[in-house]
Image (spheres, rainbow, N blue to C red):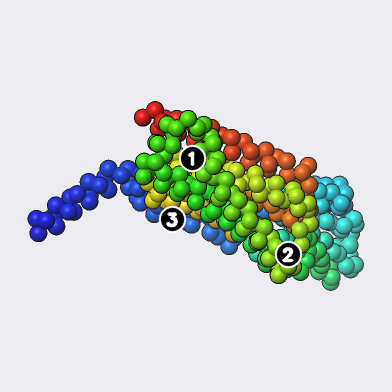
């Protein structure tokens, strides 16, 4: 029994001294319950929409107020021309556009048929389906209010839905960008962080840092092979998506590959940062999974829409590069966006790469001096 107690004491001391692993083990349940509790929801709130009101009458304004009051929608633009809605899908990342026709009020209050048109982004089928149901629900309640006011019309308001970007309702459109993102993180960030952490754990990194070789060459030489594998995997995924699942690539393929390479640099920079603060491969793996992989799944808009998350989580999502990459790659692949449409996403990813790389290099310098 004394031997068992001695071994237990030794192991408890070892766990206590390994501050990083202890923190991760204790923090993981708290982070998981908060993330899953606030991010996983089938309800969508404050979805961005544009409303083109060609009627500009009392009834059309009342319908717009009904959309506002529902809590489901956030009207971000009132285009004067229906053609401007297509621009809003790229520039303002709206989920749907609503066109209220001219003479809407007079048609509604008479026996003539009244109709509104909905242009829906079907690149995310689940979100589009929920929002279309919300729109029909708002219109239905609006009809009831009109009838209660004494202005009864035998013809209900017709909702005409135009499906944009994915009229075939192919679910692969939603998953391919997210899968590419996860593959890049697993291969580039995770493998790079584990490889460099292994050098630290086996004490070979110290030997490499004292050699007359620039540290940037050491780091780049370790990371580039995994970036190459990541790019090869991405090309394979794109090929399978196009030839097997018939997913079109609407934008420029070279712009798409450039975007992937920039994101790989960002992921590699994160992996380098993790390795610079990790003492063991286990620490590197856990930090990467908790600090990048999990937020990519939950806070990137890949599986769960960001609009219905609490504001603090929407701000937190801005910190992680996966959100910006998924927005950009969807715009290029599905919406046919050009460099003028996604330059701000590229700039954000580039700035993140530089900041992470500079901080990582400073941490490596500290280890060199120790």
Q: Secondary structure at mark 3?
A: helix
Q: Secondary structure at mark 2?
A: helix
Above or below, comparing residue 161 to residue 54 in the picture? below
- Find residue 108 and report its horizontal and vertical position in percent: 85, 62
Name the residue tied to disc 2.
242
- Which mark is nearer the camera, 2 or 3? 2
**Which mark is drawn over residue 273?**
1
Q: Is residue 348 visible?
A: yes
Q: Is residue 146 visible?
A: no
Residue 277 appears in which quarter of the rendering? top left
Q: Residue furthest left?
A: 2
Dot 1 or dot 2, earlier in sequence: 2
* Residues at marks 1 and 3 touching, judged by CB atoms closer than 8 Å: no
Q: Nearer the viewer, residue 88 or 291?
A: 291
Q: Give me the residue at 67% from left, 38% from top.
A: 347
- Which mark is nearer the camera, 1 or 3? 1
**Which mark is drawn over residue 33?**
3
Dot 1 or dot 3, earlier in sequence: 3
- Find residue 80 and report its horizontal and vertical position in percent: 86, 47
* Residues at marks 2 and 3 touching, judged by CB atoms closer than 8 Å: no
- Find residue 105 and report its horizontal and vertical position in percent: 86, 57
């Amino acid at each position: 029994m004394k031997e068992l107690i001695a071994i237990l004491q030794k192991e408890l001391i070892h766990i206590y001294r390994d501050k990083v692993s202890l923190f991760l083990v204790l923090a993981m349940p708290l982070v998981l319950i908060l993330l899953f509790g606030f991010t996983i929801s089938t309800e969508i709130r404050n979805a961005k929409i544009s409303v083109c009101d060609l009627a500009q009458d009392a009834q059309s304004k009342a319908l717009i107020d009904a959309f506002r009051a529902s809590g489901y929608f956030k009207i971000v633009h009132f285009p004067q021309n229906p053609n401007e809605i297509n621009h809003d899908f790229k520039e303002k990342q709206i989920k749907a556009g609503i066109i209220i026709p001219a003479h809407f009020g007079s048609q509604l209050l008479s026996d003539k048929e009244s109709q509104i048109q909905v242009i829906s982004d079907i690149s995310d089928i689940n979100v589009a389906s929920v929002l279309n149901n919300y729109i029909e629900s708002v219109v239905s309640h609006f009809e009831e209010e009109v009838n209660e006011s004494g202005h009864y019309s035998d013809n209900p308001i017709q909702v005409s839905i135009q499906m944009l970007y994915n009229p075939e309702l192919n679910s692969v459109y939603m998953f391919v960008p997210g899968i590419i993102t996860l593959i890049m993180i697993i291969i580039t960030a995770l493998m790079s962080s584990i490889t460099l952490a292994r050098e630290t754990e086996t004490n070979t990194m110290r030997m490499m840092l004292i050699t007359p070789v620039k540290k940037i060459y050491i780091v780049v030489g370790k990371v580039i092979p995994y970036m190459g594998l990541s790019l090869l995997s991405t090309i394979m995924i794109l090929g399978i998506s196009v030839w097997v699942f018939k997913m079109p690539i609407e934008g420029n393929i070279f712009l798409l590959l450039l975007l992937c390479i920039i994101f790989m640099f960002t992921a590699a920079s994160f992996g380098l940062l993790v390795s610079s603060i990790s003492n063991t491969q286990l620490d590197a793996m856990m930090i990467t999974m908790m600090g990048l992989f999990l937020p990519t799944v939950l806070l990137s808009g890949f599986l769960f829409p960001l609009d219905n998350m609490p504001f603090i989580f929407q701000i937190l999502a801005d910190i992680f590069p996966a959100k910006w990459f998924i927005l950009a790659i969807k715009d290029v692949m599905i919406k046919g966006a050009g460099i003028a449409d996604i330059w701000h996403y590229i700039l954000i990813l580039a700035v993140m790469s530089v900041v992470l790389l500079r901080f990582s290099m400073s941490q490596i310098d500290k280890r060199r001096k120790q």
